[in-house]
Image: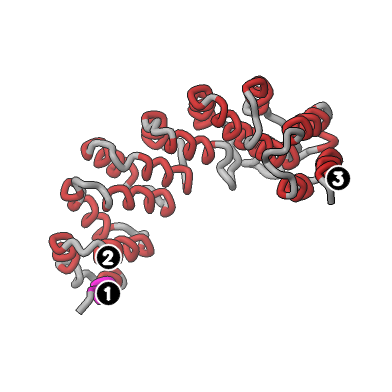
Amino acid sequence: MSGDDRLAFLARAGSAEAVTAALSQIESGNPRLREAVLQRYNQIDADPRRLDSDGGIRSALLRGLRQCAQAGDIGLLESAVQTYEFAAPRGHDDHGEVACNVRAAALLALAELDEPLAAFHATRLLADRFTAAGSREPALTAVRLLAAAGRHLPLYRHVLQNGAIGDEAAECFRALAEAPPSILLDLAERWQSSSDEVALLGLFDTLLGHPDLDRFTGFVMRFIEESELLDLVAYLAAAIVARHSEPLIELLAGRAGLPNPRGQLIRDALALRPS
């Protein structure tokens, strides 16, 4: 298939998969790629409900545009990162918004051209009430973009206000790895009663990897003693042993006699120590 044939295939692609397949066959340096992507995007954007009801095609096109975008595309990308479209809700907790992936893909493409502008939009998207319940997009992409850019204060505010869940919250906690220990300890105490194991996993990864770990040992041991999230207790015990920190391992060993199954989980972790 020639380069012209691949561009023609992209111009008539009617699914996200077809767009992705076409883009994978077109060299990123092709001078006509940007024009073809923009032309197809504008065609679909003129009648999105009929041509792209879930935003999948436009999301794929925006991912393709990311590699060849120019300053003149900022207006289109800002429009895309503020695009909201609605279908019939599928349940009581479903708001019916379907363009979350369009906003996420546009945000990443915008960051390639104007990172400060993208950071403003990312901060706004953290508070987007139409974040998808399952994928947590575009908030998850916004978190990762802000973390990569070293813009930690919006992420701190996000977890401080309990606005994040799951991977979204975990990524926020991991991005705060260099936060002052007093700030992290306050966050840990605010989140200690959460049942969100994925979020807490990110929190404890940050605490255990912090250079001032001794500031958090009391909190960590109390969580091991009291939490009902036994899978996370097992993870923490194993992570402590894996760090080869003898003072911390001694504290853990002092809790090996706790009633089962908690005590058994601790003993299992301690058994992982090299002989």
Which of pointers 3 and 1 indicates the residue nearer the eye? Answer: 3
Disc number for residue 242:
2
Disc number for residue 272:
1
> What's under tag 1, amino acid-wise?
Leu
Please state which of residues 118 and 8 is positioned toward the viewer in this rendering.
8
Q: Is residue 144 visible?
A: yes
Q: Badges 3 and 1: C-beta atoms under 8 Å apart? A: no
Residue at image coords 51%, 29%: 122
Please state which of residues 133 and 137 is positioned toward the viewer in this rendering.
137
Quarter location, residue 37? top right
SS at circle 3: helix
Q: CA distance from mark 3 to mark 1?
A: 58 Å
Label 2 neighbour load within 10 Å: few <14, some 14-19, many 20+: some
Quarter location, residue 52? top right
Going by the image, does 47 lie left or right of 198? right
| Disc with the residue nearer the chain's start (3 vs 1) | 3
Image: 270 above or below 209? below
Residue at image coords 68%, 35%: 65
